[in-house]
Amino acid sequence: MSRNGLTRQVTINDVARTAGVSRAAVSKVIRDASGVSASMRERVLAAIEELGYRPSLAARALRGSSYRIGLEIPHLDARFMSLIADGAKGALVGTPYELVLAVADGPEYSAIEALVDGLVDGIIAVAPLVDGDWLETLASRLPIVMLGRHDSPENYDTVVGEDDVGARAVMSHLLSLGHRRIAHVTESEAVTAPGIGTPHAVRLQTYLDCMLEAGHQELVSVVRRSPGTYGWRASTARLLAGSEPPTAVFAGHDDIAFDVLAAVADSEHAPDKVAVVGYDNTPLAAHPLISLSSVDQSGLEMGAQAAAMLLERIAGRTEPRHHVVTPTLQVRASSRPADLMDASRPNARARERTAKTG
Amino acid sequence: MSRNGLTRQVTINDVARTAGVSRAAVSKVIRDASGVSASMRERVLAAIEELGYRPSLAARALRGSSYRIGLEIPHLDARFMSLIADGAKGALVGTPYELVLAVADGPEYSAIEALVDGLVDGIIAVAPLVDGDWLETLASRLPIVMLGRHDSPENYDTVVGEDDVGARAVMSHLLSLGHRRIAHVTESEAVTAPGIGTPHAVRLQTYLDCMLEAGHQELVSVVRRSPGTYGWRASTARLLAGSEPPTAVFAGHDDIAFDVLAAVADSEHAPDKVAVVGYDNTPLAAHPLISLSSVDQSGLEMGAQAAAMLLERIAGRTEPRHHVVTPTLQVRASSRPADLMDASRPNARARERTAKTG
DNA sequence: ATGAAAGCGCTAACAA
DNA sequence: TTGTTAGCGCTTTCAT
């Protein structure tokens, strides 16, 4: 009756008593340590089975390791985060480590702290805004790998995509298609402020650079989520309804792009008159009804890489490593000119629907 | 230098020493317990601040509670799960509890166990296949709320949607539209086997019942994911390419429905000749390029409800509670007859995009 | 109001 | 090979 009048949990003592051995013996067996005879191992295993014993992580963590890796992500609904989690989880298969997730609501500090207090042997986190010094301090106590940070810290590792390369690929693509009036729809001011080095700040800066280089500086148009709304649909709708709407939109990430596509669909503009490109190459981008051009930076691989690096750190490495992922642009229908689209459509009949309904 | 040559963590002893008080005093302060003078509280708080102290959850959990709620979900990519997590997280705001997630790869046992060992005060889980007796045993040691189980256990609570009601709504809708050749695309055999009482088994059974009641028993057509593939697109494509393809598809959940829509778009069938209805009313279903009819069972509310019930259990309740959610069908363009679609489409041109496959 | 001390379940020296 | 023992950081009586 340990809590709430519930049944007491089975402890290592119960197993030891049942098997007629010492606690240390049980501990050795469950840790696969050396110095256990076959017969003893057998008896202990039998007792464990019989009692349904599972070692308490709290006790274990108190002594040494918890065999848990914490992954902190902002928003669960961002599909890119799912990819990262899947990748990390995959990299942990075959190791004694389990992945636990913490979702940050606001500033990622609290979520990371929840993980730190919470018995993990190491942390992978997506937290672009968290203070670097704070992280350095934290990292001096716990192995840490950060995703999507462009800094070069001493105490933790990073895995980051070349956001400038990716953004430039988008802009080159759109410019080469003849677009001049290209808008950029992105995240809130907080994560895109100049010079803060977040992925979205870099993408925005690259957008601005490219527009300048192309001589389109007066056509620059940056849109952020409308305060008080849940997405970018309303902001984009306003943009499209303006007097000089863009002919192309570079969206900060795919979820933004989906909202942009929705706004275009809602608008008076013919869908194929507004090119849209996203970022992250989320699975849904490949859906034929969406068919969104997007920059692929392999979230799966990034997650796996981060987990592998964290494991190295847990194993003892202390020199920082910084893994860079080179993104590639995946072009799909959302940014193909209409005539090209016609030629590339695998199914001409799909258009019948248009004829009937439009 | 506790691990990996890293800096030792700040403990309650450090705080006590710095503040010049006993450990017990510090403990009282951080727990807001009674019996602390204002001056002592102040000194302790100052020391905590100065040292950046955070109590070790491992140690706390060993003695009492960890203030962590574990949520186990199968697949992170299922959008419905995100809704549940969001709902649960929301319900925990303002409480001292934090939510941690564990994603199950295969049989949910291991993920749940990872959470149990792992220092949570209670568990919310989506685990339709886990053995009821096993859960009862587990629940006698730890507060548990299960989602999507149609059983009526004694030791744990449940939050479940009326899958028969939802499925019947779908079928009535499709039948009233005049469809006779209605296919059901669903999950693997494992989770849809007759009589196992999982949501998907109930939906399938209801589908069969409705087809029978409508006198269409020979037109029954059930499709599952092709082994070795990642989705339902290939299976559905085969179905559509058959000699007598369905005119309507009832998909087991929205993610399946998206695959079905993709297969339809890929096929020789005009999109509006194949009605598609999903389940869960995932946010993307409302996207104008998707516009998927779907059964809404409010994952947000289910998650919040589950968290609230778990909190009650942690607070001491032992009588089981079983919360039932009544689903409602949300009709959208994917299952409207063409003429109706014309009348209701806000922007005729929006549909043009469906022509783009890429 | 404050502190001393006994554990929670486990691991890791060390002793036998 | 096996068992004994000393904590890990914290909470919680129980004295003071």
Image (cartoon, coloured by chain):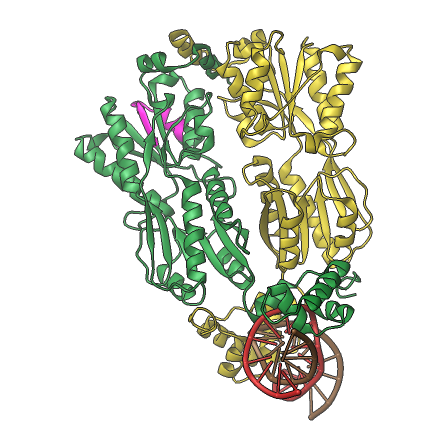
Chain colours: A yellow, B green, C brown, D red
> Nearest the camera: A191 or B342?
A191
Residue at 54% in and 52% down = B99
- Tell me if residue B183 comes above or below residue B102 in the rendering: above
Q: Quadrant of the N terminus of chain A?
A: bottom left
> Nearest the camera: A335 or A215?
A215
- Tell me if residue A337 comes above or below residue B144 in the rendering: above
Q: Give yes or no for residue B237 being in the magenta stretch.
A: yes
The answer to which quarter of the image holds residue B277 is: top left
> How far across and how far down the image is residue A154, in percent?
83, 48
Q: Which residues are magenta?
A: B236-250
Q: Quadrant of the C terminus of chain A?
A: top left
Q: How many marks?
A: 0
Residue at 37% in and 47% down = B191
Tell me if A51 is positioned left or right of A130 in this view. left
Residue at 20% in and 30% down = B216
> How far across and how far down the image is residue A143, in percent?
73, 54
> How far across and how far down the image is residue A36, in percent?
62, 78
> Nearest the camera: A222 or B244?
A222
> Nearest the camera: B322 or A173?
B322
Q: Give yes or no for residue A306 being in the magenta stretch.
A: no
For the question of whether residue B221 can be seen, the reply is yes
> How far across and how far down the image is residue A315, in percent?
74, 58
For the question of whether residue B269 can be seen, the reply is no
